[in-house]
Amino acid sequence: MPWFPAWGIEFDKEIEDVKEFLSTFNHLRPDDKWLLLAFEVAASENHLWTAWYSMKRNQMKEKMIANSPEAEFLRIIAGTHQVRIAFENAGIRNMDQSAWIIRLPDVEINSNINLNYINRETYNNHELEANNLIERMNGSLIAQRPSPTLEGLKRIIYENEIDQEKSLEEYFLLHLISSNV
């Protein structure tokens, strides 16, 4: 599985005014395919690609609940039908110290797409833009890839019992799927 275009950013100080912070980010981002995702809620490359694929499929079928692809992506990650709750649970909040800068890929989908054959350069093609965003937001790159945590499951309000037989990643994926049921 190729890396999803996501870069961890640690802010120079915790977010004090999320609305002002998002306004600054929206002004600095190169286009509207960039978004901020709460750091804890990205569980894996699989998780991010699955959310992206669900968003693209909803967009293609004209069945998006949110008004924009980036809001739809957050909604799916949050595992909810309510966009407001998606922003509260999967978006950044006051007091957050880190996040993921996400660039939604430009890959078109059809019934024959195989996620194992997505261009591995999808991440590299936007690395300079991501690093520029990180610098302009007075942050520093977090040198790690997404990994599932209990803290992340709690943030997206996973309410079912956790069975030790399943991996945490499976719980994130199951929760994600519930947004389209």
Image (cartoon, helix red, strand yellow):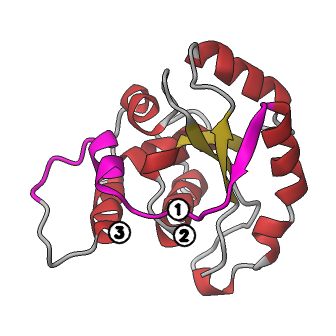
CA distance for labels 2 and 1: 7 Å
Check disc 2 and report the residue beneath it.
45
Estimate the x, y position of residue 55 in percent, counting from the top left.
54, 54
Predominant SS of the magenta segment = loop
Whether the magenta-drawn stretch holds residue 138 is answered as yes
Residue type, label 3? Glu
Residue type, label 2? Glu
The part of the chain drawn in magenta is 137-161
Check disc 1 and report the residue beneath it.
146
Estimate the x, y position of residue 53 in percent, counting from the top left.
55, 64
Callout 2: helix, strand or loop? helix
Instruction: Give the quadrant of residue 115.
Output: bottom right
Check disc 3 and report the residue beneath it.
169
> Which image quarter is the C terminus in?
bottom left
Front-most of residues 30 and 106: 30
- Tell me if residue 64 can be seen: no
- In the displayed structure, 26 sits above or below 155; it is above
Residue placed at 74% from the left, 28% from the top?
A: 25
Q: Classify mark 1: residues with Cα within 10 Å, few (<14), some (14-19) or many (20+).
A: many
Q: Do the numbered discs 2 and 1 sit on residues whose CB atoms are within 8 Å?
A: yes
Pointer 1 or 3: first along the chain: 1
Residue placed at 14% from the left, 62% from the top?
A: 162
Q: Nearer the viewer, mark 1 or mark 3?
A: 1
Residue placed at 85% from the left, 32% from the top?
A: 136
CA distance for labels 3 and 2: 10 Å
Residue placed at 58% from the left, 13% from the top?
A: 17
